[in-house]
Image (tube, rainbow, N blue to C red):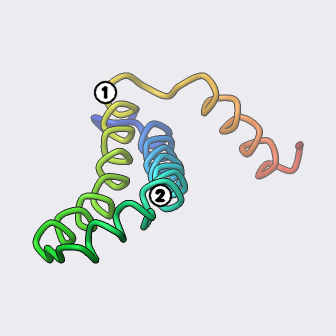
């Protein structure tokens, strides 16, 4: 019997969810939130380093926050079905049966 408040399988799934969600958020943020022509023109017309810094900071901070939300969601609600199937497959591979 384990005395762990959060079972190890749930912790592992939460870590995977964090990494996956953070990577997906960066993949979406970098091409779409990157430097656009409108941003370059606006910055060239009137450079505002404070706004530019805040914009870059938000773009860099948002994906890890999305990952944290995923981590906490999995910890609070349990392992999603798609993660359970992936975990079962990798457990079989570790045991030499998969």
Q: Is residue 46 left or right of residue 89?
A: left
Q: Is residue 13 above or below residue 52?
A: above
Residue 50 sits in which quadrant?
bottom left
Q: Give percent across and percent down for residue 65.
A: 29, 49
Q: Nearer the viewer, residue 41 or 4?
A: 41
Residue 76 is labelled as 1
The image shows residue 73 at horizontal and vertical percentages of 34, 31
Q: Assign the C terminus to one quadrant of the image.
A: top right
What SS does tag 2 mark? helix
Mark identifier at residue 66: none
Q: Within the image, what quadrant is residue 92 found in?
A: top right
Circle 2 crowding by C-alpha within 10 Å: few under 14, some 14–19, many from 20: some
Q: Nearer the viewer, mark 1 or mark 2?
A: 2
Q: Residue at x 47, y 57 (%)?
A: 26
Please state which of residues 92 and 82 is positioned toward the viewer in this rendering: 82
Q: Are marks 1 and 2 in contact (CB under 8 Å)?
A: no
Crowdedness of circle 1 by 10 Å Cα count: few (<14), some, many (20+)? Answer: few
Q: How many marks?
A: 2
Locate residue 52, reporting x and y percent: 21, 70
Residue closest to the eye, 67 or 72: 67
Position of residue 32 relative to residue 13, above or below, is below
Quadrant in the picture for the N terminus: top left
Residue at image point 15% right, 66% down:
51
Q: Which residue is mark 2?
A: 26
| Quarter location, residue 10 | top left
Of pointers 1 and 2, the one earlier in the residue sequence: 2
- Give residue 24's position: percent from left, percent from top: 53, 50
Instruction: Give the CA distance from mark 1 to mark 2.
Output: 24 Å
User: Residue placed farthest to the left in the image?
Assistant: 50
């Amino acid at each position: 019997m384990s005395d762990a408040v959060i079972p190890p399988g749930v912790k592992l799934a939460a870590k995977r969810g964090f990494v996956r969600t953070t990577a997906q958020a960066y993949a979406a943020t970098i091409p779409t939130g990157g430097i656009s022509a409108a941003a370059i023109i606006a910055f060239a017309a009137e450079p505002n380093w404070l706004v530019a810094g805040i914009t870059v900071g938000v773009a860099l901070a948002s994906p890890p926050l999305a990952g944290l939300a995923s981590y906490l969601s999995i910890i609070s609600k349990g392992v999603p079905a798609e993660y359970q199937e992936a975990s079962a497959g990798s457990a079989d591979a570790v045991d030499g049966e998969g």
